[in-house]
Image (cartoon, coloured by chain):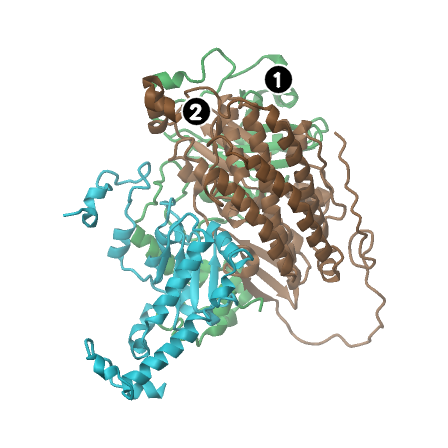
Chain colours: A cyan, B green, C brown
Amino acid sequence: MGLIDKVPPRVVGESPALLGEGTPAFLTSKIDFLVNWSRRNSLWPMPLGTACCGIEMMAAFASDFDLARFGMERMSFSPRQADVLICAGRVTYKFAPVLRRIWDQMTQPKWCVSMGACASTGGVFDVYSMVQGIDTVIPVDVYVPGCPPRPESLIYALMMIQEKIRQEKLDQHAILRAEDPAAVAKPRADAEEIASVSGPFGNSTQQNRVSGSVRTDAISRPGDRIP
Amino acid sequence: MADDKSSFDSVAEGPRPSSEVTVSPVKVDSPARAHPSVTALTDQFGEAILRHEVVATDQHIVFIPPDRNLEILSWLRDDLDQQYDLLRDVTAVDYGGGRPLQVVYQLFSLFHKQALRVKCELPLDALEIESVCGLWMAANWLEREVYDLFGITFKNHPDLRRILMPPDYAEGHPLRKDFPLRGRFSRAEQTRRALSQDLKHYYFDDEIELGGESQALPPMDGPQALPSGENEAEAEVETGVEASE
Amino acid sequence: MAQKTVEFTLGRNPEMGMDGRPVMGPLAPIDLPEPDIESDNMLLNIGPQHPATHGVLRLICELDGETIVRCIPHIGYLHSSFEKLGEYRTWNQVVTLTDRMDYLAPLIYNCAYVMSVEAMMGIEVTERCKLTRVIMMEMDRIFGHLLWLGTFAMDVGAFTPFLYTFEEREKIYTLHESYTGARITTSATRVGGMMSEMPEGWDQGVRDFCNGLPRTLDECDTLLNENGLLLGRTQGIGVISGEDALNYGLTGPNLRGSGVPYDVRKDQPYYDYESYDFEIPVGEYGDCHDRYLVRTEEMRQSLRILHQALDRLPKAEGPMDVPDPRISLPAKTDAMNDMESMIHHFKLVTDGIHAPAGESYFPVEASKGELGMYVVSDGGTKPVRWRVRPPSFVNLAALPKLLEGHLLADLITINASIDIVLGEIDR
């Protein structure tokens, strides 16, 4: 993409006149469109189905829902040829390094869908062996709620990925998709963040060791209050 | 539940902390409800049959001393009137509060269509029992699971390793009552430990020996592990995703 | 109890000997010197992320050329500690955990768990509840076998049956959803009854499904039964004798494929299974092909049970739940209007059910084999120990034995033929 290198980086808040016909920005936006169009309509999913959600993912690939309509005809069981990782199901600490390794093996650009409550937050499994949300291990683009989510939810999540791709800019690619070699095989979140996301949050009234120290009612979440 | 005490008396009494509750299933000694195997066991082994209990109307439990489990179980399997040829399950029960752990064998005889439960009580300071792998191969993984989750050692087991938890799991034996549900370490520490494993946590010693140096993996942490796919061959050995293609 | 061996219309592949092992044709003798190549056995790792391992199973194989010398399964990559979590839940809350264990046939697990708790508490459920549970369990046996049929066919190289069986599975998903509100995680049972009365027309929906399924099964049979590829890849592969299978603790279709007619529904009947007219298909050779035939025949036998149970349903009028306010929730209108019922409702929801001290091991025939739910109570509202005797865990333990001396390509077939589900193996 030598062409892109010659284009001056886009300035935030640039005037719309610069996007007119014949300007460099016009050219890149057309290339953006073309590349993004081809990318988003030929996403190859890497199905990582571990548990119940994996069955719903299979249902989404099977006849009734037919994910192939969205350009996901070919399931890529090799991470090296995949574009979007669908992590469907529970992830344990024993499996976490494998998940991280699969993510590291995927080539850029790559996206990740965390399907189901267990993958997104740990779900009902607030226990010794379960990762409390795969976003502590790898970055996630779309979370799908549900236990398990219906196939329509997964299709919607993949459509959101497509929407995200549609908005990507190629000249930002090198910045947004840069990978730090030192981050390979390391958890995505630091200790503080893991502690903050994996505290008991109300689904575990019978079981947590610090119950009572954390308020779980709606009032404690400031965003829920109408001023 | 054969006596006149209602099953729901505990409702009126209200909940009790489980540490105060003593477990005393109802003993039934009436010959009409006796189990033929229990009678035969008492005739054969006498004092070694410590207790006999009946639970859930018709389920019979026999308590035997842990040091004679192999002898009694092999008799139960081989005697023509017993023929317990299917070992349904091996598990353990921890009642907590310092009480002994129970090892539970669920037996079934296909010929006589009879089920029998055999229990051994192990005090907490001597968690050792003879393995029954020689009698039923089914015991192999089941005993490994009990070892993993309860920490009971099965002597003469062919392959006693952790089975569900990682081999280097340092927090203890999860199904014991003194183990907290969310583990002993913090979530951050658990995540850090999970992702800082190296080769020896993925393969057992004899597997590493077999694989040899040529198939050895680089350590998981560190930038040299997988900068941009140079170590492809090793990575494929790791996740195996390419193995079938 | 005489077990009838179901006569399979299909003959054996003529190249198979009577013992089920392939008979090698006469080869032209080639007189080559022994190759003088120094070779080592090779280590091959398959999984934990591999499409043919049905989840996160990891197999380490020692290969001599293409022959498997030794196979070591590694499990635990999905260990979600159900049993520990169950000790922190009340008796009814555990039901929601059971269906996340075997997500291929969730209703069997729901039913088996509450049946064990009821046996421990000495509760006899109503006739209508029994029939409903029998219908649910048989429906989910078909549900599990259908997925197995699709993936098994896919593993031996045929993709079409997968699409056919998933079409039928979608119908069962719809039935699940109309009863329980969820497609997979059903949580349909409660101690002493069901979550609710059957919705209007649900039994007719089950009957429609039963009438439509044989056509799909016949279609799959047409595709697979005389398919030379399937016969070649399954006959004589993964043979295990009846004695060995019993010693390894195999149960379900894997044991019956080896000719041992052990089925909990016949041998330790529960819920009046002795009064239903159905047969236990039994294989002869104990290879992958027999296990395939046993499972397809089992679906047809389950259909027979379903029809009989649906016929009995209109005669079993009455309440679904045990009419005991200490176990079953009162009707919603009562709870709103009547003080007594409201207190019962409140106590049941906040405290949970009190089970008397005791224990129970209750075996049922799940789609994978014998499923035993072992519950121990100390008189409180939560289990002291909840143990699941996992059928596929014990079946998988025999995998190294089945694989001995086979080619690497057969590993996929054999692994598919024993029908595992990792959620229940790792628990």
The residue to which callout 1 is attached is B34
- How many C-alpha atoms fall within 10 Å of the one at disc 2: few (<14), some, or many (≥20)? many
Q: Is residue C396 left or right of residue C234?
A: left
Residue pictured at 45% horizontal, 33% vertical: C385
> Quadrant of residue A160 in the image?
bottom left
The residue to which callout 2 is attached is C328
> The residue marked by circle 2 belongs to what chain?
C
Residue A144 percent coordinates (x, y)? 38, 55
Confirm or deny contact between disc 1 and disc 2 (CB under 8 A).
Answer: no
For the residue pair A43 and B157, the one nearer the viewer reads as: A43
For the residue pair A165 and C109, the one nearer the viewer reads as: A165
Q: Amino acid at mark 1?
A: Ala
Label number found at residue B108 = none
Residue pictured at 65% horizontal, 46% vertical: C213
Residue A112 percent coordinates (x, y)? 39, 63
Residue pictured at 44% horizontal, 27% vertical: C377
Q: Is residue C130 above or below residue C299?
A: above
> The residue marked by circle 1 belongs to what chain?
B
